[in-house]
């Protein structure tokens, strides 16, 4: 069994990771950590996440110097379920000790001068690690994920969007010069567990945000190799993302070519499902799946993609990355085989 330490284990994605690792055939928990000064330090994990009562009875430990030394010597791999700046600061220390790091934040996803200053509001100090990190879009990047020591698990909207668009881009079916348009709705858990006015029960209403300035637009464009228009919306539900993607096809593209592009990309892949009907959040919430379906009218294609933002959009994709990195079955701990 490989021992996995989770930093940020009291948060939404960290708690999902704890559950997935607890149930994984080849992984075991090597500690659940929160910040050194956390108000939750030393509390039982289950006092924050009671659904794991009697199952994961571990304390939330403060990430102080002693804890970091303990992780260096006792853990086989580290999962960072922390804010971007926190992951940016923590990852290099674990990497220097030779530990593989799977980072759920955006801190190592997009190389490029000035990118983090512009879209994340901090200056990136670790260009060498940023250049060496593998982008953990599991169905698309297996060789890089296997080889890298640092895996940057994609954002939730980019996972939903890229899963829909990459087969078309790879097959060369998208019209030159046309920008695919992604309109996506996320559940409120996408914003994390920390309280904020915008995410409080009485304030949440279906609405757009991040118009023309969301950091996932450049993340999607970079990893697609084509500029996109991306518009996120906050929905009044807890978990899940539904992305509707509008694509202008090249002249003369046939239904068979579109179907072949998706078959070529996902045949034999168990996590991305070609749903055969329009996806809905209820079908994927609480699961590691990404459901896709498409329809067309002439050269106008619509693809719909649905995922659970906390799972395929974060924690279960991180587990897919660990599985690939370690040579386990790609779906170990996610789907019974
Ligand atoms: N929520 C989602 O759907 C998705 C989130 N992500 C990304 O994953 C990361 C985690 O997200 P999410 O789970 O939603 O976040 P949460 O806000 O729910 O959790 C953050 C966790 O980090 C801990 N933490 C904060 N500061 C530190 C620190 N200095 N050292 C150690 N631990 C710390 C928090 O505990 P405490 O403050 O008590 O220390 C908490 O456990 C983020 O980068 C997010 O952008 C990616 C894809 C989807
Ligand atoms: C509803 C909501 O607020 N969602 C988050 C996306 C969370 C995510 O994918 O995470 P990364 O920050 O790691 O990219 C947002 O739009 O910022």
Image (cartoon, grey):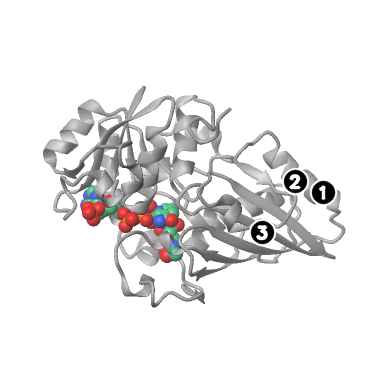
Asked whether disc 1 touches disc 2, contact meaning CB atoms under 8 Å apart, the reply is: yes
Task: Report the front residue among 317 and 151.
Answer: 317
Q: Is residue 323 above or below residue 141?
A: above
Residue wearing tag 2:
261
Instruction: Report helix, strand or loop for mark 3.
Output: strand
Residue 97 x/y as whole percent:
25, 31
Task: Report the front residue among 100 and 250.
Answer: 100
Determine crowd level at label 1: few under 14, some 14-19, many 20+ residues with C-alpha closer than 10 A: some
Between circles 1 and 3, the one closer to the viewer is 3
The furthest residue to the front = 54
Q: Residue at x 42, y 32 (%)?
A: 23
The N terminus, quarter of image: top left
Instruction: Report helix, strand or loop for mark 2.
Output: helix
Residue 83 x/y as whole percent:
31, 55
Number of marks present in the image shown: 3
Q: Is residue 137 left or right of residue 117?
A: right
Q: CA distance from mark 3 to mark 2?
A: 15 Å
Instruction: Report helix, strand or loop for mark 1.
Output: helix
Q: Residue at x 60, y 48 (%)?
A: 290
Q: Is residue 29 left or right of residue 154?
A: left
Whether residue 95 is visible, yes or no, is: yes
Q: CA distance from mark 1 to mark 3?
A: 18 Å
Residue 214 x/y as whole percent:
46, 68
Q: Earlier in the sequence, mark 3 or mark 2?
A: 2
Q: Earlier in the sequence, mark 1 or mark 3?
A: 1
Residue wearing tag 1:
257
Between circles 3 and 2, the one closer to the viewer is 3
Residue 304's tag is 3
Q: Residue at x 54, y 59 (%)?
A: 241
């Amino acid at each position: 069994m490989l021992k996995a330490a989770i930093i940020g284990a009291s948060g939404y994605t960290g708690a999902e990771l704890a559950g997935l690792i607890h149930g994984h055939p080849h992984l075991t928990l090597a500690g659940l950590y929160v910040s050194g000064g956390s108000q939750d330090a030393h509390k039982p994990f289950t006092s924050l996440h009671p659904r794991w009562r009697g199952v994961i009875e571990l304390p939330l430990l403060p990430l102080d110097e002693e804890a970091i030394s303990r992780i260096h010597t006792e853990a086989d791999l580290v999962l960072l379920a922390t804010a971007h700046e926190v992951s940016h600061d923590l990852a290099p220390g674990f990497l220097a000790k030779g530990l593989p790091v799977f980072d759920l934040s955006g801190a190592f996803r997009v190389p490029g001068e000035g990118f983090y200053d512009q879209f994340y509001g901090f200056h990136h100090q670790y260009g060498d690690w940023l250049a060496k990190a593998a982008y953990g879009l599991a169905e698309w990047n297996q060789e890089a994920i296997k080889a890298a020591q640092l895996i940057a698990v994609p954002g939730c909207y980019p996972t939903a969007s890229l899963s829909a668009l990459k087969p078309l881009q790879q097959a060369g079916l998208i019209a030159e010069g046309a920008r695919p348009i992604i309109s996506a709705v996320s559940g409120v858990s996408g914003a994390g567990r920390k309280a904020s006015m915008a995410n409080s029960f009485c304030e949440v209403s279906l609405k757009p945000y991040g118009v023309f300035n969301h950091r996932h637009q450049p993340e999607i464009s970079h990893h697609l190799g084509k500029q996109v228009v991306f518009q996120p919306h906050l929905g009044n539900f807890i978990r899940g993302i539904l992305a509707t993607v509008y694509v202008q096809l090249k002249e003369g593209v046939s239904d068979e070519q579109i179907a072949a592009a998706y078959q070529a990309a996902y045949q034999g892949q168990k996590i991305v499902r070609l749903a055969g009907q329009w996806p809905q959040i209820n079908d994927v919430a609480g699961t590691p799946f990404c459901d896709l379906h498409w329809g067309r009218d002439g050269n106008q294609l619509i693809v719909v993609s649905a995922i659970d933002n906390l799972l395929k959009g974060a924690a279960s994709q991180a587990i897919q990355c660990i599985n690939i990195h370690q040579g386990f079955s790609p779906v170990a701990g996610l789907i019974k085989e």
